[in-house]
Image: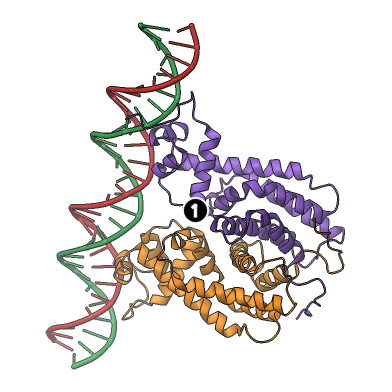
Chain colours: A purple, B orange, C green, D red
Amino acid sequence: MSHMGYGCLMAVDRDHVLRSAAALLTRKSTATMDEVAKAAGISRATLHRHFAGRDALVRALESLGIAECEAALDTAALDEGPAPDAVRRLVRTLEPSAALLAFLYTENQLFEGEQQNAGWTRIDDRIAALFRRGQAAGEFRIDLTPAWLTEALYGLLASGAWAVTEGRVARKDFTHMITELLLGGALRQDTPRRKES
Amino acid sequence: MSHMGYGCLMAVDRDHVLRSAAALLTRKSTATMDEVAKAAGISRATLHRHFAGRDALVRALESLGIAECEAALDTAALDEGPAPDAVRRLVRTLEPSAALLAFLYTENQLFEGEQQNAGWTRIDDRIAALFRRGQAAGEFRIDLTPAWLTEALYGLLASGAWAVTEGRVARKDFTHMITELLLGGALRQDTPRRKES
DNA sequence: GTCGCATGAGACATGAATGTCTCACATGGG
DNA sequence: CCCATGTGAGACATTCATGTCTCATGCGAC
């Protein structure tokens, strides 16, 4: 046969496999191990040699997502400068991981057992702390809880990643759309707010 | 045996089955037909008598979600009054359907084929038209596209529904959290916006 | 050239979910 | 009272993803 045009390197690029899997599973969360393997350009046997099974693959994706998240949190330096600017830095830094996070966000199976990865809790806490800092500094409103703002950030990241892959939003507008909506909302600056009921 | 305490009525309450299925599948999207049946308090055989298979069940849930969405769109009277108020009415009216919509939103299998239900397009168009109307009236910012605002609304509804079931947000705050974030954003009113780059 | 090693291809068994069937029972109407 | 209907329970075959295995190939190292 020899239908593989490129030479086979010594070892499969594990990172490449994970990213291909993330890209595919984001679009089709029920994809078969065989489809995942084909998407990565390897055989099902090799895929299984590197990841004991589907569960192990998803767990590896989870670890990758957590690692990228925490790296982004470090890079964004959430403790420095005005909190709104820190949010902008965070979203911009998180953009390359958005598709992976969108997949993990909908993989609710990861969060049901008590063996859920503690990494998510750490990440949640760090982001919530950022919003809390902004509230304490008088930059953010206090009627939106830090927990909700954190959850909303996840949701907007997932929606944004999805909208980009669907072509409803240009990739270059990803960061702008998310940060502006999250921070400023849809209303124009000069539009008076409606009284609270 | 006679382990069923309540008398069996003439016909299974189809709506009750669908709502039970939606509640379960929202938490565990990979639930078995047997689990769905047990959640609804019926046997797998009866479940299969009413819905030919898992696919048919999901399609029925989709139709239910579309119907509730369109009913909410009608009730909210999006064409009347200020656009921001219409958004508030829409979110409030959509709240009871939020969990179902959150499940359908993550069921990306519904949107991949070209046989996707045209109802979603109609709904998208109506909501996008609302945002476009608000932009034309000078109430909404024009740098956030109607398509993105629509997508963000879906994302926030899903995040809100998820946050409520997880206990991170009180159910009574659902509408407030979503509408205030979507319309006003996280920044305080008097916080100066950062210059656009 | 030869060996080692990772891979691709495919066969095979296993397990789970599904779809279909039959039978018994309980209810409600005639 | 008897029958029709809808249901629960369970058996059964089928399908499919998965996990495991073997074997051949191709490349790099020695």
Q: Is A96 positioned to the left or the right of B36 in the image?
A: right
Label 1: how many residues lie within 10 Å, few (<14), some (14-19) or many (20+)? some
Front residue of this view, candidates B154 and A151: B154
Instruction: Return the residue at label 1.
Output: A27
Which amino acid type corresponds to the residue marked 1 in the rendered image? Answer: Arg
Q: Which residue is at 41% across, 63% downward?
A: B114
Q: Which residue is at 43% across, 73% downward?
A: B63
B185 relative to A122, above or below:
below
Q: Which residue is at 58% across, 50% downward?
A: A99
Picture coordinates of residue B149, whole percent (x, y): 65, 68
Q: Is B179 positioned to the left or the right of D22 in the image?
A: right
Q: Is residue B97 visible?
A: no
A176 relative to B121, above or below:
above
Q: Is residue A17 visible?
A: yes
B149 relative to A56, above or below:
below
Looking at the figure, which quarter contains the C terminus of chain A? bottom right
Q: Is D7 positioned to the left or the right of B148 in the image?
A: left
Picture coordinates of residue B86, whole percent (x, y): 66, 81
Picture coordinates of residue B17, whole percent (x, y): 41, 72
